[in-house]
Image (spheres, rainbow, N blue to C red):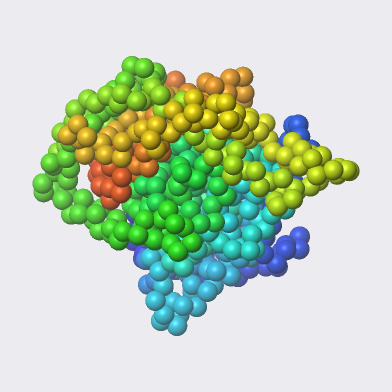
Amino acid sequence: MASRSPLAYAALLPRHLPLAADPAGASPFCRRLAGPPPPRPPPPPPRRRAPATLRATAAAADPPSAASMAAAVRSGAVTAEALTVAALRRLTAAEPTLHAFLTVDADGALAAARAVDAAVAAGRPVGPLAGVPLAVKDNLCTAGIPTTAASACLANHVPAYTATAVARAVAAGAVVLGKTNMDEFGMGSSTERSAFGPTANPWDTARVPGGSSGGSAAAVAAGVTPLALGTDTGGSVRQPAAHCGVTGYKPSYGRVSRHGLLAYASSLDTVGVLAASVADAALLARVMAGPDAFDATAVGDAVPDYTAALAAVDAAAGGAPPLAGLTVGVVTDERVAVDAAAAGAVAAAVATLRSLGAATRPVALPRLPSAVAAYYVLAPAEASANLARYDGLRYGDRGAAAGAGTVGELVAGTRGGGLGAETRRRILLGTYALSAGYHDALYGRGAGGGGGGFPRRLGGGVDVLVSPVAPAAAPRLGAGDASPTAVYAADALTVPPSLAGLPAVAVPAGVCAATGMPVGVQFVGPAMADALVLRVAHAFQGATDWHRRRPPLADEVAAAASAAAAVA
């Protein structure tokens, strides 16, 4: 949606919203929305509880951009506490339908918001995200707040430290509302593989939001929060962004620290952003990026000013075409089948890019058909090693192994009862690929000299690639249960950038006529060319309005939150 000025936003909320005590007796730091699941199979529907009761007099409204929110707080036009209360009301209204959150830290969010307000009142500098509500995927550690990776194995895990990406966002003034649902340990593409139950798509609650960052994508699409953190190993930010009609940014590998991320595949995992627009995603990305002493894979290069790169695009409006001089390669490969909606979205995006001054040409990626095979050797192999720690001895809830008489029985009970079917499947695949008789034939070939053999430079005289994000719009809940391999095959267009560590941005670019569900395209650039990819995606959004379209549920959530404020 178009950004509101700070003064326009100030009219939406009063400067202070008094809060009533929580009659349900919230814990000092958070309220869990889903309790520990019973033994598998199958997990029951999650037990949901609303965050602390909020009493105030304010009208809920569609949230403005993150930049406008922060500007309003810095100017004193609105308080961070008011923004937080409004976001918690929207969360409360949306959660029974979506189940996007696993934990809500209402008390902590309000305390953080008041600290921002105190800094503003004292004239101290506040960061670029001052008072902006933020949702965090539940595989990013948060000190004192449960971090489960949506696994029964970690149902009671409360970290003692905070992930670098989260800590940097908080230091910039962001207010963490809670932790979002996901596929267990990031292994899935529908957010159905959560031990605490699935998340629904705000556009159609009978459909998946994508995954594994589906909770974060759903929270942004429903208007609960303008920003959310996700993680992308093979498309887990971009694919749910496309399915939910929001923006998803996957940084270059090493651009953002992985410290505090519960590892799935360490050579592929990246911390990314779900946002309502590229401009908002760039604002958070700039804060998170940079070297980190706790992560040896974090790149030490200076981080470009992403927001300045986008400002240059805006300044070009009415003058020279903002993408003049760039060549965009259009990925065309009949070996990867996409439906008419996905193909049409790319065709329309190409026409838009040309109108913005870019040249386009078709490109073929010779290794594209082997991407899925390489990914599903490399990622499970790393997962097999990374998840070995969840054995009931080092980590892992021992509830499923009650009565174990030996160490072997303890490990088998903890892993067999605490890890879901998809996670166990990928561990077995990885263990097999690393076994003595098959290491060279499987893992060695999949690695292909590093990165699955995929180049970190685009070549072919192109600066950026454009392609569909997924072969089709979001499927119905349960549609992927019959054939896991068919679900894997749908990752064909998202895993190549991950294998090569390239930056990519997924943006809404159309609607499936048959279902009314959003369809996205992704822009991919060379390694460390994040500013370029964000610039192209921002120019595209400046010429289209797909990212401004909201699901009806978002309006219902805003209306319900407004009604709750009116009677409080």
Q: Is residue 558 visible?
A: no
Q: Is residue 396 visible?
A: yes
- Place of residue 471 in the rendered image (x, y in percent of width and height, measured from the top left): 42, 24
Residue at 50% from the left image edge and 78% from the top image edge: 118
Q: Please tell me whether residue 216 is drawn above or below residue 121 in the rendered image.
A: above
Residue at 44% from the left image edge and 24% from the top image edge: 472
Q: Picture quarter containing residue 337?
A: top left
Q: Picture quarter containing residue 184?
A: top right
Q: Please tell me whether residue 239 is drawn above or below residue 248 in the rendered image.
A: above
In this picture, residue 110 sits left or right of residue 399: left
Q: Residue furthest left?
A: 320
Q: Please tell me whether residue 539 is drawn above or below residue 454 in the rendered image.
A: below
In this picture, residue 508 sits left or right of residue 391: left
Number of numbered discs overlaid on the protein picture? 0
- Place of residue 273 in the rendered image (x, y in percent of width and height, measured from the top left): 43, 49
- Place of residue 157 in the rendered image (x, y in percent of width and height, measured from the top left): 69, 54
Who is closer to the viewer here, 175 or 300? 300
Who is closer to the viewer here, 84 or 145? 145
- Place of residue 259 in the rendered image (x, y in percent of width and height, measured from the top left): 51, 57
Q: Residue furthest bottom?
A: 122
Who is closer to the viewer here, 452 or 271? 452
- Quadrant of the image for the C terminus? bottom right
In this picture, residue 435 sits left or right of residue 391: left
Residue at 17% from the left image edge and 49% from the top image edge: 317
Residue at 72% from the left image edge and 48% from the top image edge: 396
Q: Please tell me whether residue 385 is drawn above or below residue 17 in the rendered image.
A: above
